Image (tube, rainbow, N blue to C red):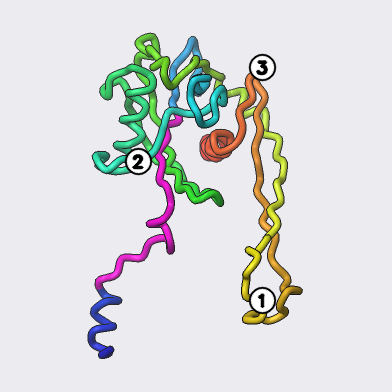
Protein backbone atom coordinates (compact mmCIF):
# COMPACT_ATOMS: atom_id res chain seq x y z
CA UNK A 1 0.00 0.00 0.00
CA UNK A 2 1.35 3.44 -0.94
CA UNK A 3 2.15 6.03 1.74
CA UNK A 4 0.01 8.64 -0.03
CA UNK A 5 -3.05 6.40 0.19
CA UNK A 6 -2.42 5.70 3.89
CA UNK A 7 -2.13 9.41 4.67
CA UNK A 8 -5.32 10.15 2.70
CA UNK A 9 -7.19 7.53 4.74
CA UNK A 10 -5.88 8.98 8.02
CA UNK A 11 -6.83 12.55 7.05
CA UNK A 12 -10.42 11.55 6.31
CA UNK A 13 -10.85 9.59 9.55
CA UNK A 14 -12.93 11.04 12.41
CA UNK A 15 -11.94 9.42 15.74
CA UNK A 16 -14.65 7.73 17.77
CA UNK A 17 -14.75 5.06 20.46
CA UNK A 18 -13.00 1.95 19.14
CA UNK A 19 -15.57 -0.80 18.64
CA UNK A 20 -18.51 1.52 19.28
CA UNK A 21 -20.31 0.30 16.15
CA UNK A 22 -20.99 -2.93 18.03
CA UNK A 23 -22.46 -1.17 21.08
CA UNK A 24 -26.19 -0.74 21.67
CA UNK A 25 -26.90 2.98 21.99
CA UNK A 26 -29.52 4.41 24.32
CA UNK A 27 -30.68 7.89 25.29
CA UNK A 28 -32.44 8.84 28.53
CA UNK A 29 -33.99 11.97 30.01
CA UNK A 30 -33.58 13.03 33.63
CA UNK A 31 -36.85 14.97 34.03
CA UNK A 32 -37.14 17.93 36.39
CA UNK A 33 -40.47 19.32 37.58
CA UNK A 34 -41.40 22.33 39.69
CA UNK A 35 -43.46 21.02 42.60
CA UNK A 36 -44.63 23.26 45.40
CA UNK A 37 -41.60 25.49 46.11
CA UNK A 38 -38.86 23.12 44.99
CA UNK A 39 -37.46 21.35 41.97
CA UNK A 40 -38.10 17.59 41.97
CA UNK A 41 -36.63 14.75 39.93
CA UNK A 42 -39.25 12.57 38.24
CA UNK A 43 -38.85 8.80 38.03
CA UNK A 44 -40.72 6.00 36.32
CA UNK A 45 -41.43 2.53 37.68
CA UNK A 46 -41.23 0.12 34.77
CA UNK A 47 -44.41 -1.82 34.00
CA UNK A 48 -44.56 -5.34 35.40
CA UNK A 49 -45.60 -6.46 31.91
CA UNK A 50 -42.19 -5.63 30.43
CA UNK A 51 -39.79 -8.48 29.78
CA UNK A 52 -36.67 -6.51 30.71
CA UNK A 53 -36.29 -5.16 34.26
CA UNK A 54 -40.00 -5.10 35.19
CA UNK A 55 -40.78 -3.06 38.32
CA UNK A 56 -37.42 -1.28 38.38
CA UNK A 57 -37.06 2.48 38.73
CA UNK A 58 -35.67 4.37 35.77
CA UNK A 59 -35.73 7.56 33.73
CA UNK A 60 -37.66 7.83 30.45
CA UNK A 61 -35.53 6.55 27.61
CA UNK A 62 -34.67 3.74 25.28
CA UNK A 63 -32.72 2.57 22.26
CA UNK A 64 -31.74 5.16 19.66
CA UNK A 65 -33.60 4.39 16.42
CA UNK A 66 -32.60 5.11 12.84
CA UNK A 67 -35.35 7.73 12.52
CA UNK A 68 -33.95 9.75 15.44
CA UNK A 69 -32.06 12.85 14.34
CA UNK A 70 -29.56 12.45 17.16
CA UNK A 71 -29.22 11.29 20.77
CA UNK A 72 -31.21 14.27 22.07
CA UNK A 73 -34.01 13.52 19.62
CA UNK A 74 -34.17 9.95 20.87
CA UNK A 75 -34.38 11.05 24.51
CA UNK A 76 -37.18 13.46 23.65
CA UNK A 77 -39.11 10.90 21.61
CA UNK A 78 -38.96 8.31 24.38
CA UNK A 79 -39.98 10.84 27.05
CA UNK A 80 -42.96 12.02 25.02
CA UNK A 81 -44.05 8.43 24.35
CA UNK A 82 -43.66 7.21 27.92
CA UNK A 83 -45.06 10.20 29.81
CA UNK A 84 -47.80 11.16 27.34
CA UNK A 85 -46.78 14.80 27.09
CA UNK A 86 -46.05 17.00 24.09
CA UNK A 87 -42.57 17.90 22.88
CA UNK A 88 -43.25 21.58 23.64
CA UNK A 89 -43.69 20.75 27.33
CA UNK A 90 -40.02 19.78 27.71
CA UNK A 91 -37.65 22.76 27.93
CA UNK A 92 -34.13 23.60 29.09
CA UNK A 93 -32.63 20.39 27.70
CA UNK A 94 -28.93 19.88 28.39
CA UNK A 95 -26.60 16.90 27.90
CA UNK A 96 -24.83 15.13 30.74
CA UNK A 97 -21.71 12.99 30.39
CA UNK A 98 -22.41 9.89 28.33
CA UNK A 99 -21.68 6.49 29.83
CA UNK A 100 -20.03 3.38 28.42
CA UNK A 101 -21.42 0.31 30.11
CA UNK A 102 -19.27 -2.83 30.52
CA UNK A 103 -22.27 -4.70 29.11
CA UNK A 104 -21.93 -3.30 25.60
CA UNK A 105 -24.05 -0.15 25.86
CA UNK A 106 -23.43 3.56 25.37
CA UNK A 107 -25.95 5.70 27.26
CA UNK A 108 -26.50 9.36 26.38
CA UNK A 109 -28.28 11.15 29.28
CA UNK A 110 -29.99 14.53 29.09
CA UNK A 111 -31.69 16.79 31.64
CA UNK A 112 -34.97 18.49 30.77
CA UNK A 113 -37.63 20.52 32.56
CA UNK A 114 -41.25 19.38 32.22
CA UNK A 115 -43.25 22.58 32.31
CA UNK A 116 -46.73 21.10 32.86
CA UNK A 117 -46.36 17.97 35.01
CA UNK A 118 -50.13 17.90 35.55
CA UNK A 119 -50.41 16.83 31.90
CA UNK A 120 -48.40 13.66 32.43
CA UNK A 121 -50.37 10.54 31.47
CA UNK A 122 -47.93 7.58 31.60
CA UNK A 123 -48.13 4.93 28.89
CA UNK A 124 -49.36 1.88 30.89
CA UNK A 125 -47.67 -0.60 28.54
CA UNK A 126 -44.29 0.75 29.61
CA UNK A 127 -44.79 2.67 32.84
CA UNK A 128 -46.39 1.29 36.01
CA UNK A 129 -46.30 4.59 37.89
CA UNK A 130 -44.34 7.82 38.24
CA UNK A 131 -43.17 9.59 41.35
CA UNK A 132 -40.97 12.55 42.23
CA UNK A 133 -38.23 13.19 44.78
CA UNK A 134 -37.11 16.66 45.92
CA UNK A 135 -33.68 17.47 44.57
CA UNK A 136 -32.69 18.57 48.07
CA UNK A 137 -32.97 14.94 49.22
CA UNK A 138 -30.18 13.89 46.86
CA UNK A 139 -28.07 16.91 47.72
CA UNK A 140 -28.17 15.95 51.40
CA UNK A 141 -28.04 12.17 51.00
CA UNK A 142 -25.10 10.64 49.16
CA UNK A 143 -25.63 7.28 47.48
CA UNK A 144 -24.40 4.04 49.01
CA UNK A 145 -21.81 2.46 46.74
CA UNK A 146 -21.20 -1.27 46.45
CA UNK A 147 -18.68 -3.10 44.29
CA UNK A 148 -19.13 -5.97 41.89
CA UNK A 149 -15.99 -7.85 40.85
CA UNK A 150 -15.76 -9.59 37.49
CA UNK A 151 -13.32 -12.45 37.04
CA UNK A 152 -11.77 -13.16 33.63
CA UNK A 153 -12.67 -16.66 32.39
CA UNK A 154 -11.18 -17.38 28.94
CA UNK A 155 -13.07 -19.88 26.79
CA UNK A 156 -12.00 -23.52 26.82
CA UNK A 157 -9.89 -23.39 23.63
CA UNK A 158 -8.14 -20.09 24.50
CA UNK A 159 -4.56 -20.17 23.04
CA UNK A 160 -2.58 -19.78 26.27
CA UNK A 161 0.57 -20.89 24.41
CA UNK A 162 0.51 -17.64 22.43
CA UNK A 163 0.74 -15.29 25.43
CA UNK A 164 3.49 -14.65 27.97
CA UNK A 165 2.72 -16.49 31.20
CA UNK A 166 0.42 -19.00 29.55
CA UNK A 167 -2.26 -20.33 31.88
CA UNK A 168 -0.69 -18.32 34.71
CA UNK A 169 -1.26 -15.02 32.93
CA UNK A 170 -2.17 -12.32 35.44
CA UNK A 171 -5.58 -11.18 34.21
CA UNK A 172 -6.86 -7.85 35.43
CA UNK A 173 -10.03 -8.05 37.47
CA UNK A 174 -12.88 -5.71 36.61
CA UNK A 175 -14.53 -3.69 39.35
CA UNK A 176 -17.97 -2.13 38.85
CA UNK A 177 -19.45 0.40 41.24
CA UNK A 178 -23.20 0.15 41.82
CA UNK A 179 -24.92 3.21 43.30
CA UNK A 180 -28.02 3.01 45.53
CA UNK A 181 -30.37 5.72 46.77
CA UNK A 182 -33.16 4.73 49.19
CA UNK A 183 -36.14 7.09 49.34
CA UNK A 184 -38.94 5.79 51.55
CA UNK A 185 -39.92 2.48 49.90
CA UNK A 186 -38.20 3.31 46.59
CA UNK A 187 -34.84 1.83 45.58
CA UNK A 188 -33.04 3.84 42.89
CA UNK A 189 -29.97 2.02 41.67
CA UNK A 190 -27.90 0.96 38.66
CA UNK A 191 -27.40 3.25 35.67
CA UNK A 192 -30.26 5.47 36.85
CA UNK A 193 -28.54 6.12 40.18
CA UNK A 194 -25.18 6.65 38.45
CA UNK A 195 -26.62 9.26 36.08
CA UNK A 196 -28.46 10.91 38.99
CA UNK A 197 -25.28 11.07 41.09
CA UNK A 198 -23.40 12.71 38.23
CA UNK A 199 -26.16 15.29 37.81
CA UNK A 200 -26.25 16.06 41.55
CA UNK A 201 -22.47 16.57 41.63
CA UNK A 202 -22.79 19.02 38.75
CA UNK A 203 -25.44 21.17 40.47
CA UNK A 204 -24.32 20.74 44.09
Distance in Å between CA atoms under marks 2 and 3: 31 Å
Q: Nearer the viewer, mark 3 or mark 1?
A: 1
Residue 99 point in image, percent of width and height? 49, 47
State which quarter of the image contains the N terminus: bottom left
Residue that appears at 63% across and 69% down? 157
Distance in Å between CA atoms under marks 1 and 2: 39 Å
Residue that appears at 61% across and 28% down? 188
Residue 24: mark in rendering: none
Q: How many labels does the image show?
A: 3
Reading the image, the residue beneath label 3 is 185
Q: In which quarter of the image is residue 170?
A: bottom right
Q: How crowded is mark 1: few (under 14 residues within 10 Å), some or many (20 or more)?
A: few
Depth check: 5 or 164 in front? 164
Depth check: 89 or 69 in front? 69
Reading the image, the residue beneath label 2 is 64
Seen in the picture, residue 171 relative to 6 is either above or below; the reply is: above
Q: What stretch is highlighted in magenta?
A: 12-30
Residue 56 point in image, percent of width and height? 57, 26
Q: Do the residues labelled 2 and 3 touch (CB within 8 Å)?
A: no
Residue 160: mark in rendering: 1
Tell which circle, 1 or 2, labels the residue nearer the N-terminal end. Answer: 2
Residue 23 on the magenta segment: yes
Amino acid sequence: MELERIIKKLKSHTPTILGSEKFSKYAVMLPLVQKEDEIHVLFEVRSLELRRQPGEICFPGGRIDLQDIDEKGAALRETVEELGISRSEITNIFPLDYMISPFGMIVYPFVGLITNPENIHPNPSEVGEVFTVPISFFIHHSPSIYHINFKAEPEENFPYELIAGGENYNWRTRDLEEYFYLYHDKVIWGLTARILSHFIEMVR
